[in-house]
């Protein structure tokens, strides 16, 4: 066992540490250390079959039901590369401005673990498929480019399931051989917030390309972080640690904040930072030492003799480039330019491809983009968040939302009634017109009918009327509310306001 195995870095030892250790420095001379972070992101590709065999990649099947002699590494079998894996990797490389290598090669990464049936993982080492890319991230209104060192293909390992009641672990090999891409950043990230923003940016791109669902909780997107500190102004990197077991954006940020504080405390005391792999314990908010960090030579990489090198011609790359969809940054710019939306609205609406498509369908049927945006970001997203639903599961089609907004624009329903109708639409999936007719929610626009209610409210509220006429303007809102209450929300608000002002000023 590694001498530091199972050591917990307790949160209580960090209680007296200054928060300066994990604030963004960007060379600020008032700060003792600069944070240096690099992320390694593994994304499972949405192919129907595994990378080197025909077994299904469907998630959630019975344990060990999606296996065969190839993915289990039986003697005498030969892997055959799935062409779609190469195509998906090229898509991601192009979307992140990487150069595509005309010649790349698979290697064997040798290590022993119960979830690795062959005793090695087929990956890429010296000759990856893509190098030298970048993405742009925005934190606190500041945009920065984060460089990507490489993107390469590899196979996933199996999954260990630990028994809660006895010292036993079970192995499910269904995940073995599921295709992955690993996206390795340069050490350009300078804060936990920037790390989370980078991770979200890559997840958006993966989902727009429809090559990975980005589900961190199910493990289809996983993140490891390398983090170190160095004195501000120093070029040489400090001793790094690797953080694992972070299954959400929030946990990535929390784990990095903790580790930066921990390393800062060690350096303040003149103690060395030990290069090791740490697990993040989200329930306790601490890191736990897992093992000493292996170097590349520990894996004894060598070219896989069963797989031929991959040659990617320019024609193939250009054909894939032509088929790339509109990516998040380009769509955001278009939403601002073509729809006249504020940058914040465009950012929210393009956070997922499905949400952006929903907005455009609704805006096509009701061509007032800002009103559509407001309703999606307030009423619709509030309900989706409450029910923990994705937009794909939304019971209100974009055409129905547009129909409701048309009813409101025509004056058929008031804004207040429209929200009541929307709640019914969301809970039942019914169309707004049906709900309005069935429940008798048509807005009252008859001036004489509304005037009668206004007169009644004025007669019943002599104190408020006198107070308003004496200069207490806030009482006007009270009187409007009383009229709306008596009309059960059906009175046209503009007519109510006009009548009240006229009668109160006479």
Image (tube, rainbow, N blue to C red):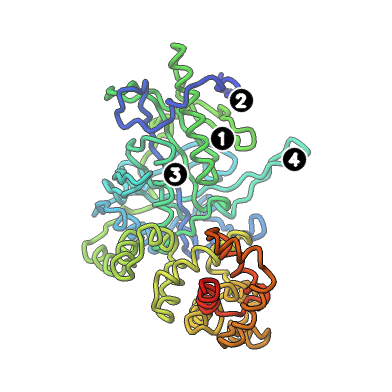
Q: Earlier in the sequence, mark 3 or mark 1?
A: 3
Q: Where is residue 45 in the image (x, y as percent from the top left)?
A: 45, 58
Of residues 401 and 181, the one drawn nearer to the viewer in this rendering: 401
Q: Name the residue under label 2.
A: 6
Q: Which of marks 3 and 2 is nearer the N terminus?
A: 2
* Position of 399 relative to 109 (above/below): below
Q: Name the residue under label 4.
A: 164
Q: How far apart are marks 3 and 2 (CA)?
A: 27 Å
Q: How far apart are marks 1 and 2 (CA)?
A: 12 Å
Image position of 105 (left or right of 357):
left
Element class at badge 1: strand
Q: Distance between the residues labelled 3 and 1?
A: 16 Å
Q: Mark 3 points at which residue?
A: 196
The total of numbered circles placed on residues is 4
Where is the N terminus found, in terms of image quarters?
Answer: top right
- For the residues bearing labels 3 and 1, Cβ distance under 8 angstroms: no
Of residues 284 and 162, the one drawn nearer to the viewer in this rendering: 284
Element class at badge 3: helix
Residue at position x 38%, y 33% from top? 24
Q: Where is residue 67 in the image (x, y as percent from the top left)?
A: 58, 57
- For the residues bearing labels 1 and 2, Cβ distance under 8 angstroms: no
* Position of 43 relative to 15 (above/below): below
Image quadrant assignment for residue 310: bottom left
Q: Which of marks 4 and 2 is nearer the N terminus?
A: 2
Regarding residue 268, the answer to whether it shows in the image is: yes
- For the residues bearing labels 3 and 4, Cβ distance under 8 angstroms: no
* Position of 82 relative to 421 (above/below): above
Q: How far apart are marks 4 and 2 (CA)?
A: 18 Å
Which mark is on residue 280?
Answer: 1
Regarding residue 72, the answer to whether it shows in the image is: no
Q: Which residue lies furthest to the left in this view?
A: 314
């Amino acid at each position: 066992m590694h001498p530091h195995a199972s050591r917990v870095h307790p949160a209580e030892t960090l209680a007296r540490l200054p928060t300066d250790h994990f604030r963004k420095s960007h060379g600020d001379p008032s700060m003792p250390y600069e944070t240096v972070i690099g992320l390694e992101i593994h994304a499972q590709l949405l192919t129907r079959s595994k990378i080197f065999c025909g077994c299904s990649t469907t998630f959630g099947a019975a344990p060990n039901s999606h296996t065969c002699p190839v993915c289990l590494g039986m003697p005498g079998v030969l892997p055959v590369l799935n062409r779609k894996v190469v195509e998906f990797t090229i898509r991601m490389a192009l979307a992140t401005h990487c150069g595509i290598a005309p010649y790349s090669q698979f290697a064997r990464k040798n290590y022993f673990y119960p979830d690795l049936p062959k005793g090695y993982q087929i990956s890429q080492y010296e000759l990856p498929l893509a190098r030298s890319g970048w993405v742009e991230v925005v934190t606190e209104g500041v945009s920065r480019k984060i460089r990507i060192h490489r993107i390469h293909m590899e196979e996933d390992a199996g999954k260990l399931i630990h028994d809660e009641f006895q010292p036993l672990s079970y192995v499910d090999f269904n995940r073995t051989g599921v295709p992955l891409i690993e996206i390795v950043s340069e050490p350009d990230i300078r804060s936990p917030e920037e790390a989370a923003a980078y991770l979200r940016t890559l997840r958006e791109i993966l989902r727009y390309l429809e090559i990975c669902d980005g589900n961190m909780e199910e493990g289809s997107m996983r993140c490891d972080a390398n983090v170190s500190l160095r004195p501000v102004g120093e070029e040489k990197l400090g001793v790094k640690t690797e953080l694992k077991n972070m299954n959400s954006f929030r946990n990535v940020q929390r784990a990095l904040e903790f580790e930066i504080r921990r390393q800062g405390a060690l350096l303040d005391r003149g103690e060395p930072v030990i290069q090791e792999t740490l697990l993040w314990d989200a329930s306790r908010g601490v890191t736990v030492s897992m093992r000493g960090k292996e170097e590349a030579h520990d894996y004894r990489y060598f070219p896989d003799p069963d797989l031929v090198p991959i040659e990617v011609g320019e024609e193939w790359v250009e054909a894939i480039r032509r088929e790339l969809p509109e990516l998040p940054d380009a769509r955001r710019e278009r939403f601002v330019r073509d729809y006249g939306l504020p940058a914040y609205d465009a950012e929210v609406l393009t956070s997922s491809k499905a949400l952006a498509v929903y907005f455009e369908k609704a805006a096509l049927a009701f061509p007032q983009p800002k009103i559509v945006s407001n309703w999606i970001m307030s009423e619709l997203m509030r309900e989706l968040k409450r029910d923990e639903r994705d937009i794909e599961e939304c019971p209100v089609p974009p055409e129905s939302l547009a129909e409701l907004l048309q009813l409101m624009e025509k004056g058929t329903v008031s804004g207040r009634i429209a929200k009541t109708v929307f709640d019914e639409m969301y809970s039942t999936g019914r169309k707004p017109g049906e709900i309005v007719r069935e429940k008798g929610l048509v807005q009252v626009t008859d001036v004489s009918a509304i005037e009668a209610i206004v007169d009644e409210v004025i007669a019943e509220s002599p104190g408020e009327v006198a107070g308003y006429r004496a200069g207490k303007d806030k009482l006007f809102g009270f009187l409007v509310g009383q009229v709306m209450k008596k009309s059960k929300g059906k009175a046209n608000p503009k007519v109510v306001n006009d009548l009240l002002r006229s009668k109160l000023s006479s």
